[in-house]
Image (cartoon, rainbow, N blue to C red):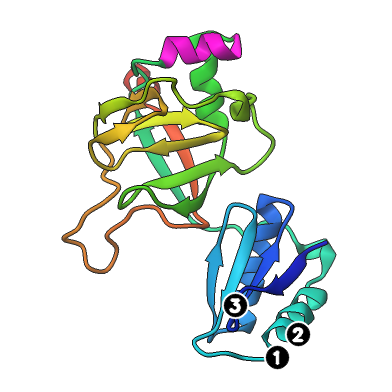
Amino acid sequence: MQHAAWFGDRAVLVQLNSTAERESITSWLALRMPDALIRRGMASVLVEMPAPDPQLLATVEHHLSALDQAATGLVEGEQVLIVTSYSGADLADTAAFFRVTPSQLIRAHTSQIWLVAMMGFAPGFGYLEPLDDPLLPWATLPRRDNPREQVPRGSVALAAGMSAVYPSSSPGGWHLLGTTTTKLFDPTDDANPTLLRPGLTVRFIDDADGRAS
């Protein structure tokens, strides 16, 4: 059951229970409230109007109540494929943390479908969370005790239940599994500067599979 409450005088915050619920409600409200700005959070959706609206909470609650519970599954969107060379500095240690072999870790990471939950930290940096049941207990892996001063651009990483790709060289405390040449941020592209955006799904592809075929 969703809980909606005022967030200031022109926005309503809807607290949610799952990724699928967040995605379906986001799509549902976006279609029915075209004048609203719909913002995803990790476990919430913020519905913001350009001006104060005393009926906003009632409107959001009305649309939520009309959402058929049987149809609250994820609205399927585009999928981004990211070819990855799994030779990261932390691959072996991360596999040992999960008590699997590096090959098993790679298989789990590439078999998992990841959802872009939100963007942040740096331009083009997407926080990816498992779309379905985690294939390994990703959430048990903490950030590194000692963050690196510089993580190379294109590094594919894990931490705190999420995966990510560093779109540029920057400090970072995530565990590095490998690298990709996929460009995640292009400041010269005015229309689509970022490859990822909230709601898209991501699959990582082991480039070793391509070399072997």
Which quarter of the rendered picture does the N terminus lie within? bottom right
| Amino acid on which the number 2 mark rests in the picture | Ala
Residue nearest the viewer, comparing 169 with 194 = 169
Q: How crowded is the residue under tag 1: few (<14 C-alpha within 10 Å), some, or many (20+)?
A: few
Q: How crowded is the residue under tag 3: few (<14 C-alpha within 10 Å), some, or many (20+)?
A: few
The stretch of residues the image draws in magenta is: 91-99
Asked whether the residues under the numbered discs 2 and 1 touch, taking CB atoms below 8 Å apart as contact, a structural biologist would say yes
Q: Which mark is residue 58?
A: 2
Whole-number angstrom distance, CA of label 3 to CA of label 1: 13 Å
Q: Is residue 96 magenta-colored?
A: yes
Residue 74, x across and y down, in percent = 66, 56
State whether the magenta stretch is mostly helix, strand or loop: helix
Badge 2 or badge 3: first in the primary sequence: 3
Q: Nearer the viewer, mark 2 or mark 3?
A: 3
**Above or below for 138 versus 132:** above
Q: How crowded is the residue under tag 2: few (<14 C-alpha within 10 Å), some, or many (20+)?
A: few
Residue located beneath label 1 in the image: 55
Which quarter of the rendered picture does the C terminus lie within? top left
Residue nearest the viewer, comparing 175 with 182 = 175
Q: Which mark is residue 8?
A: 3
**Above or below for 169 versus 45:** above
Asked whether the viewer can see residue 103, the reply is no
Q: Is residue 207 magenta-colored?
A: no
Asked whether the residues under the numbered discs 2 and 3 touch, taking CB atoms below 8 Å apart as contact, a structural biologist would say no
**Secondary structure at numbered mark 3:** loop
| Amino acid on which the number 1 mark rests in the picture | Gln
Residue 169's quadrant in the figure? top left
Residue 125, x across and y down, in percent = 36, 47
